Image (cartoon, grey):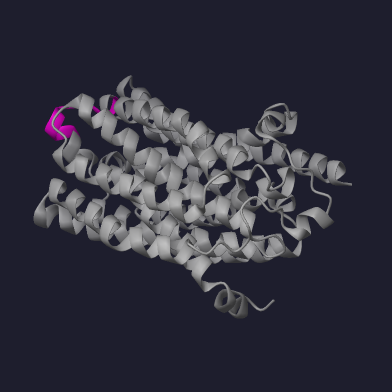
Amino acid sequence: MNTLLFIRENVRWLLGGLLLTIFSSFGQTYFIALFGAEIRDTFSLSHGDFGGIYMVGTLASAATLVWLGRVVDSHAVSTVAFYVCVALSVACLAMSLVSSVWMLVLVIFALRLFGQGMMSHIAMVAMGRWYSAERGRAVSITSMGYQIGSGVLPLIMVGLIGLIGWRASWVLAGALIIFIATPAIYLLMKKERLPRGQIPAADLAGGVRQWTHREVLADPLFWVMITGVLAPAFIGTSVFFHQVHISEIKGWSRELIAGSIAIAAITTILFSLLSGFLIDRFSARQLLPTFLVPLGVANLLLGWVDIPAAIVIYMLLHGISNGISNTLFGALWPEVYGTRHLGAVRSLIMAAMVIASALGPGVTGWLIDIGIGFESQLIGMGVYCLLTAGLMLLVAQALARRKD
């Protein structure tokens, strides 16, 4: 089907998913990190202290997501999305009022659970369940919301923080969610594209086995895939969390880094759409070995090079990997494990990704505090990506034999 015709015929569901991923931004690391310097100054925290607090809140959100994510298998997407949007709005307002370190931990927990965790989870489960033959395109269009958020919000928020202060900026974020996101997402997704729990006909015809979450946990290939899937979450969160620190050690302005994020956003959108087409044409498993290579090269570059152009090239390569992985991770799991238990299965993966994103700031911040520079850490991350990309090639071959 022509992409424009596909969008026109499915606009309400695609727009609903897109809004979910856009407004998940308020719980994403790159957004929270914009306030990192102000939060550290307010509570007299070191990089390691704030990273540790962030890690604790995020790990708690991951543990909660494992069981909360299953609710999408038994309740309407629109209903779950409504309550999650309300909860995220409350979390944003709470951040504007945070007055102690313990309250900061709780607020970060709520932002990560309902923002990065549940908003993203609902969007990807809906697209994975509601689409089969065109799943790649549906996921790629919906995942563009991440890039719209990351490309627009940093520049806006840096200006707002200077204009109205960091606490008032969080009040504005909460208002946007409750007055715009909540009613729009609910109305758009109230009519489900497929009856809840129905397996798409294409999946049945293709003989896709419907794995339970326990069976997935017992699958050796799942754990091998996780070694690759978690890398972008760990690395991306670490880089965006320490963006102010990077500007300091490289001698770059905060505006340069915030502005370069837009390059990553544009590149990610282009490669999300391209990978969506390729997934529908071939399969998600065939793209599995590709997504870590640009990220590996990008980290080596950022670790070694100090000229300002390095951050632009980094964001370009990061965008390529991000674009492929955003679409790939939405389409791979229903392709490999079916759609009947997709909410439960994907909640495991999403929780693992949240854990990786939690460990990123905590581990890297602690390493900075003990004298292991972030540039050296970037080089290590780059080597890991390139080695793991080779491992993903073996996994793709094993999945192909399983399907045959």
**Residue lying furthest top in this view?**
370
Closer to the camera in the image, 20 or 196: 196
Q: Is residue 106 above or below residue 345?
A: above
Q: Position of residue 228 (x, y in %)?
A: 61, 38
Most distant residue in the left direction? 164
* Residue projecting furthest to the right: 404
Residue 275 as seen in the image, left or right of residue 115: right
Q: Is residue 308 visible?
A: yes
The kind of secondary structure the magenta stretch mainly shows is helix
Part of the protein shown in magenta:
40-48
389 magenta-colored: no
- On screen, residue 353 versus residue 97, left or right, reads right
Residue 225 picture location, percent across and down: 67, 36
The residue nearer to you, when weighing 168 against 41, is 168
Measured from the top left, where is residue 389 in percent x and y?
A: 66, 41
Residue 353 at x, y percent in the picture: 51, 37
Q: How many marks?
A: 0
**Measuring 55% from the left and 52% from the top, which residue is drawn there?**
124
Observer-nearest of 190 and 306: 190
Question: Where is residue 105, by image quadrant?
Answer: top left
Q: Quadrant of residue 231?
A: top right
| Quarter of the N terminus within the rendering | bottom right
Does residue 368 appear in the picture of this structure? no
Q: Quick check: 49 left or right of 314? A: left
Q: Is residue 47 magenta?
A: yes
Which residue is rendered at x = 28% and y = 39% of the image? 245
